[in-house]
Image (cartoon, grey):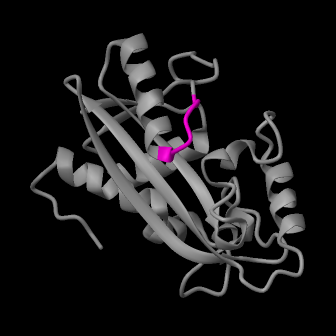
Amino acid sequence: MKLIVATQNQHKKKEILSLLGDSFEIISLSDLNYFDELPETHSTLRENADEKATFVNNYFQADCFAEDTGLEIDHLNGAPGVLSARYAGVQKNSRDNTELVIKTMEGVKNRSARFQTVICLILNNKKVFFGGSVNGMISSYPQGDSGFGYDAIFIPEGFQKTYAQMDFVEKNNISHRKNALEKMKAFLLPGQAVKQ
C-alpha cells in the first residue's frame, strides 16, 4: 500500500517505516521534491493534522496521512502544545525550543508532561483520525543525543532516561507516534491486532 506522509522530516519517516512495516510504501514530501511549508494555522493538533493531510491530498491527488505532535507540560498549562515546533520562534529550531523549555521550567517542582500525536489519514477521499500519547516528565537539562525535537528532555513514565538516551528500537516500542501509527496500521490491515 502506497501512502504519502505529510512531512519532510526524514527522522519521522524512518520511525514511521520501522513501525508500519513492509506492507506499506511510505513516501515523504522531500522524496517528491516538495519543500514548501505546510499550512498549520489551527489551535489543536487534530485540526492541524487535518489541514496538512487535506492540503497534501489535494496537491498530489493521492492517499496520504499527516500527523501533528505536541509536548504538553502541566506547569505551562499544556504549552508548548500545538506550538511545539515553533515554541522559540518561527525558525522551528529544536535546540532553541528545548533551551526555552529548560529555562521556563527552571526551579519548577511539578515537571509532569506528555507527548500527544494525532494522525489524519485520507484514504479514498475519506478521513480517519488516530491518537497516541505517552506520559512522562521534563528533565532539568538535555540528556542523550539520539532522536530529535524535545527527545533530550522528555523522560517517559517508568523510565530513568530520556527518549534521546534510548536506542531507536527502545524508543519506538513506547513512543506516542507508535501508539497512533499502530492504530492506523490496524485500521488499514484489520487482520493484525493493535499492541497496547
Q: Reply above or below: 165 against 14.
A: below
From which residue to which does the magenta span run? 40-45
Q: In the rendered image, is residue 155 in sight? A: yes
In the rendered image, residue 12, in percent from the top left (x then y), is placed at 54, 45
The one nearer the camera, 53 or 81, is 81
- Position of residue 80 relative to residue 115, above or below, is above
**Residue drawn 69% across the image and 67% down it:** 164
Quarter of the N terminus within the rendering:
top left
Query: In this rendering, would 158 be left or right of 178?
Result: right
Residue at the image point whose x is 44% and y is 20% from the top: 55
Main SS of the magenta part reads: loop
Is 20 situated left or right of 51 in this image?
Answer: left
Residue placed at 37% from the left, 55% from the top?
A: 131
Vertical placement of residue 161 versus 187, above or below:
below
Picture quarter with the C terminus:
bottom left
Residue at the far left: name it. Answer: 191
